[in-house]
Image: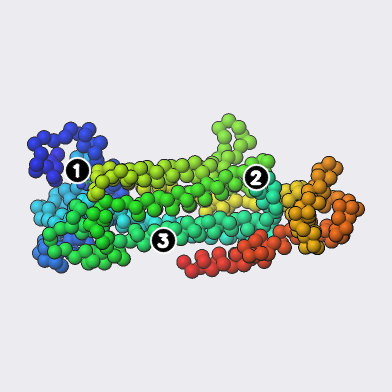
Amino acid sequence: MSKLWGGRFTKTAEQWVDEFGASIGFDQQLVEEDITGSIAHVTMLAKQHILSEEEAAQIKNGLKTLQKKAAAGELVFSAAQEDIHLNLEKLLIDEIGPVGGKLHTGRSRNDQVATDMHLYLRTQTEEIMEAIRTLQAALVKQAEGHVETLIPGYTHLQRAQPVSFAHHLLAYFWMLERDYGRLQDSLKRVNISPLGAGALAGTTFPIDRAYTAELLHFEGIYENSLDAVSDRDFIVEFLAASATLMMHLSRLCEELILWSAQEFQFIEIDDAFATGSSIMPQKKNPDMAELIRGKTGRVYGSLFSLLTTLKGLPLAYNKDMQEDKEGMFDTVKTVKGSLRIFAGMIETMTVNTDAMAKAVTSDFSNATELADYLATKGMPFREAHEVVGKLVLTAIEKGVYLLDLPIEVYKEASSLFADDIYEVLQPKTVVGRRNSAGGTGFEQVKLALGKANDLLSQS
Ligand code: ARG
């Protein structure tokens, strides 16, 4: 098949070579953006009298026909036309005749593809931000029902101090809030127009870049034509924000998986998000959580792949840059899918409050409270730590917990102890009293829920 750039060639490549070089297999996902960009470009060409009104109208109509056909899935692309840009230009010429060849006046595929990617990523970033909000809302909803549900808090995966289950869930709300903020911030750099940078150096045609930027709702234009066509830092940023987001999701997945293990039994994942075993009839596997944890790796991979692709490239465009797309598309799909599944998983999970309550009364996670008690009464904290450490040892030797030790044992350890320690040691007291800003105390958790709800209702 003849090439749109075939003029200086005397030989055509074999089909398998074309196929290796082609990006149409994946960049057809940019069909909508490519047509939108072209419509803006041709509108500007007419305004600047670079094309006549009539030519521009013909081209625009042709593009709109292609738009409809694309929506109906009627466009047939070919690897011989390499990518979405050349495929659409060829289809346009087939549709309206040689005048279609005027569309590419004052433009290059290099600024065209960069424009498509900016448009694509703007839409996708906004959709992902929405999906983050949905997951945050699911976390808040679960948290609201569990302000006073206690769960062991861990460090080193050893019982440390009990916390409110709502507080634990809200920790992820705030991580997601920063993920949201990162994406929101990246939009500032996604939302600039590279269109009109030409192949690398601008163009002799009297184009109006600000006008196309306005038509495409960009907030401004790239100041430097070389930069406009050769950087992909806006995609790197998107991938980095996505990698961080997936890392957060993956950590919560790990917790959901642990919590649903028989050893914990803190939660049960709904049947809708679990699967069975083909051999072991009793199994209910947290597959979706495992899969999100697993998919985190491919998002990291895409980030590294793009950074590596870009690091040695001289200015301006190099074909290597065609490799920027598949990782980005894959990341969009992975992140959207993961967020959607996650919201459903959180909304429908069952919280086993009995198992959690049992867990927080069968450990030594109230020991800090006892040390704080002595410190409040004037003993230097370091000494109090030592006294309580010894009491823990005594309890371990007797095979009981701190609440089970008789008052005499306490009084012997320190004369500062009084009967009120049994109240102090209750897990509800332990958690409820941690009311320093951002702490797990019930008042603080309620405040945090209020803030979280405010944020959700603002956006
Ligand atoms: N398919 C190409 C890409 O994705 C489009 C830009 C091609 N430009 C060029 N001069 N070969 O990067």
Question: Disc 1 marks which residue?
Answer: 81
Which quadrant of the figure has residue 143? bottom right
Q: Are marks 3 and 1 in contact (CB under 8 Å)?
A: no
User: Of all residues shown, which one is farthest toward the right?
Assistant: 408
Q: Could you tell me the amino acid type at mark 1?
A: Gln
Where is residue 427 drawn, in percent x and y? 75, 56
Q: Are marks 3 and 2 in contact (CB under 8 Å)?
A: no
Position of the N terminus, as image quadrant, is top left
Residue at position x 57%, y 42% from top? Answer: 286
Question: Disc 3 marks which residue?
Answer: 185
Where is residue 391 drawn, in percent x and y? 82, 49
Look at discs 2 and 1 and give the one toward the viewer. 2
Q: Nearer the viewer, residue 390 or 359?
A: 390
Residue at position x 59%, y 67% from top? Answer: 450
Where residue 35 is drawn, which disc sits there?
none
Where is residue 398 drawn, in percent x and y? 85, 42
Q: Nearer the viewer, residue 219 or 279?
A: 219
Question: Disc 2 marks which residue?
Answer: 157
Q: Crowdedness of circle 1 by 10 Å Cα count: few (<14), some, many (20+)? A: many
Q: Is residue 358 shown to the viewer in this render?
A: no
Q: Could you tell me the amino acid type at mark 2?
A: Leu
Which quadrant of the figure has residue 441? bottom right
